[in-house]
Amino acid sequence: MSHAPTGEPSLSPSEGWHCSHLYYRFNRAALKTLTAAELDEGRRQFAMVLDPLAPMAPARLQTSAVSGHKADLGLMVLDANPLVIDSVHQRLMSGPLGVALEPTYSFVSLTEVSEYVPTVEQYGQRLVAEGEDASGPAYAAKLKAYESREVMMREQRLHPDFPSWPSTCFYPMNKKRKVGENWFTLDFAARSKLMAEHGRTGMTFGGVGRHAVGPQPGVSERDRLQDALRRGQRPLCRVRAVLHELRDDAGSVAGALPGVGL
């Protein structure tokens, strides 16, 4: 993300969107204190707030049920204006069901294009380093294919869409800073190589999942909570396969500290 001054101060990022993951549980005892009319009106307003096509809806809004005891439902909300995102939370809490709605977890981030995503020129240099002849037809074909998808790939990272798939997974990811296992003691070329291998691992699951990555603002580049990953999978068993493969490849072993997900 560009950090150069762009004129007047603004809540909107110079590129990408604000993103919040919000998790809630219902207090069953508090629900029982509501009348039938209050419950009906509460459900109506709740559904209106969570309608991704409503007039006041943010650019992206996804709702999911959460397995296990940590929450009952989760939201992933994205918009250029963070106040639009916060309005979703505020309207839920101020509605009739708000007295029974308990926030359990939140994660605030910004979408970005990773520093490890190569430009077309850098991709060409990588091909040469891997043995491709820069004057050969194979090199030209691979470079053209990458160039054709690079713009779309960057757009998907900055403004991700939500496929209508039945499952999602969120978990934070940090970078190792242990003695002898410090990701940032590796030079950029070594880190880029490992991340390229990590990307190739993810590409083996092309067509069955999407991911959105957002660093948490308010901490330094090197100490940030690196990744908030969302994957929508067709069969649920593919979630396990994707996470296992990505967790165990060379890039993750060298630098990743997976957090506890939801």
Image: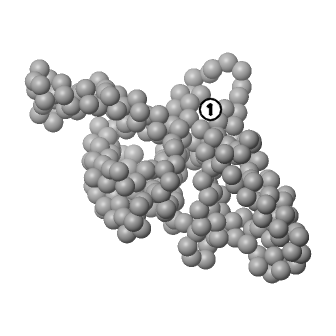
Q: Is residue 47 left or right of residue 185?
A: right
Q: Quadrant of the C terminus?
A: bottom right
In the displayed structure, 206 sits above or below 64; it is above
Q: Give the residue type at disc 1.
A: Pro
**Colouring convention used in this rendered image of the protein:** one colour
In the displayed structure, 70 sits above or below 147; it is below
The residue pinned by badge 1 equals: 13
Quadrant in which residue 89 is drawn = bottom right
Q: Position of residue 33 (x, y in %)?
A: 88, 78
In the displayed structure, 175 sits above or below 148; it is below
Given residues 204 and 127, the one toward you in this image is 204
Given residues 104 and 49, the one toward you in this image is 49
- The local secondary structure at tag 1 comes to loop
Query: Who's the residue at 29% across and 31% down the image?
Result: 146
Q: Is residue 120 left or right of residue 173?
A: left
Query: Who's the residue at 42% across and 68% down the image?
Result: 236
Numbered label tally: 1
Could you tell me if residue 41 is visible in this image?
Answer: yes
Q: Position of residue 83 (x, y in %)?
A: 74, 41
Query: Who's the residue at 41% across and 61% down the image?
Result: 234
Q: Position of residue 142 (x, y in %)?
A: 21, 31
Q: Is residue 201 left or right of residue 80?
A: left
Neighbour tally class for label 1: few under 14, some 14-19, many 20 plus, Cα within 10 Å: some
Could you tell me if residue 254 is visible in this image?
Answer: no
Query: Who's the residue at 61% across and 45% down the image?
Result: 60
Given residues 238 and 212, the one toward you in this image is 238
